[in-house]
Image: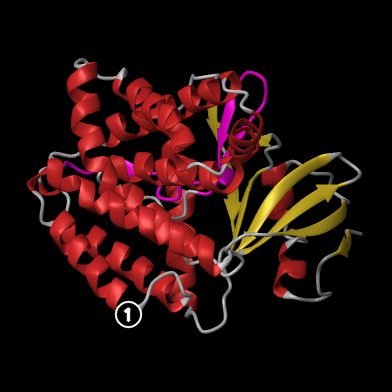
Amino acid sequence: MTGIHGDIVEHSRLYRYLKDRGLRKATRISRDPDLSVLKLGGSHDVYLIDDRRSNRKFILKSFEKNGVSASRTARRMEKEYSRLKQADHILKHRDWVRVARPYCKSDKGDFLVEKYISGTPLGSYIRDTMENGEKGKLFEKLTFLSGFLAILHKKTGKYDRISPSNIRGEVKKHARQASNGGAMTRDELKEMDRLIDQACSHKLIKSAHASLVHGDANPSNFLYDPCSMYVIDMESSRFMDPVYDLGMMSGELCHFAMLYGHDPHKADPFIGHLYWMYAGNFKDQLGTFISLTKRNPLYMANSLLRIARHPFFSLEYKRRLAYHAGECLKSLKKF
């Protein structure tokens, strides 16, 4: 008889799903498993499941959410499942980068089961670099990341141009949420909205072609062992300007430089390295680099405003993030 214990409510839907025969077959755990359930952090209820009899682990994501319809839940789950399958297919035969392969999903569309991946998150390398000045490892890890993003974007590139209204709405939403948390005054928010409108109407942004982006390129979603990089959490993946991913990581690098290095300019060489190594995957490396970095300010501003929403930062620090987001948007004028 299956044993289940840990962070779980007995006879809940999750409890019942862990007894599913299809799940046991897909994850290759023992027929009579002894399952330990550990709830992790994340935007969803995420669980690390460990079968102590087979010594196998897997990740289970619950897409159940109060106030969200079952049909919408199923669509969100199906989206991440299909994106992970697509990325896994794109990356096949490459031993230096892998994606968290999906094992199975529940028939009702509320649970998704993925391969368990252990590794050091990119954020650990960024923090260590900003605090202690050790640069070599971070350059190496960003080279891996740039290679993955280039493969993903090149393999899924479309002739269609992006819709500036999509990124405009997202940046304005993040600005409004950051302002609600104290990052900006009402007048400063109005000025930020004006800068966002101005940036999104720029021909550089309008001329970009769409590719499938990871959609949540923050340091916690890229894990490393000594020889490989692992990609997780592609729920936010969609077709956007490829600079969306690069700009998000640029904002994260700037944030880490401010928070742990006390100087946003400490991020500059790493942002430049990320873009240069990414551009090296295209025929015209210099031309690609110039084109991408010209669009970076909009997406980097979006990343900084996204971070400024978090309630656990001080008001002073959130205001600094918003200030640098505004400076990014202003810098588009010179192009």
Looking at the image, residue 44 lies above or below residue 200: below
Residue 52: percent from left, percent from top: 90, 45
Between 231 and 57, the residue placed more toward the observer is 231
Reply yes or no: does residue 162 show up in magenta. Answer: no
Looking at the image, residue 78 lies above or below residue 246: below
- Which residue is found at the position 22% from the left and 52% from the top? 330
Q: Residue furthest top?
A: 283
State left or right for residue 318 relative to residue 303: right
**Residue where numbered disc 1 is placed:** 186
- Which residue is found at the position 31% from the left and 64% from the top? 170
Residue 47: percent from left, percent from top: 72, 57
State left or right for residue 215 relative to residue 54: left
State left or right for residue 208 relative to residue 100: left
Residue 266: percent from left, percent from top: 48, 34
Answer with the quarter of the image where residue 164 lies.
bottom left
Count of labels shown? Answer: 1
Task: Specify whether residue 92 is in view.
Answer: no
Which residues fall within the magenta stretch?
208-233
For mark 1, give the secondary structure: helix
- Which residue is found at the position 55% from the left and 19% from the top? 95
- Which residue is found at the position 34% from the left and 55% from the top? 325
Task: Specify whether residue 241 is in view.
Answer: yes
- Could you tell me which quadrant the C terminus lies in? top left
State left or right for residue 301 relative to residue 198: right
Q: Residue furthest bottom?
A: 67
Between 12 and 42, the residue placed more toward the observer is 42
Identified by mark 1, the residue type is: Arg
- Could you tell me which quadrant the N terminus lies in? bottom right
Answer with the quarter of the image where residue 295 lies.
top left
Between 225 and 2, the residue placed more toward the observer is 225
Reply yes or no: does residue 219 show up in magenta. Answer: yes
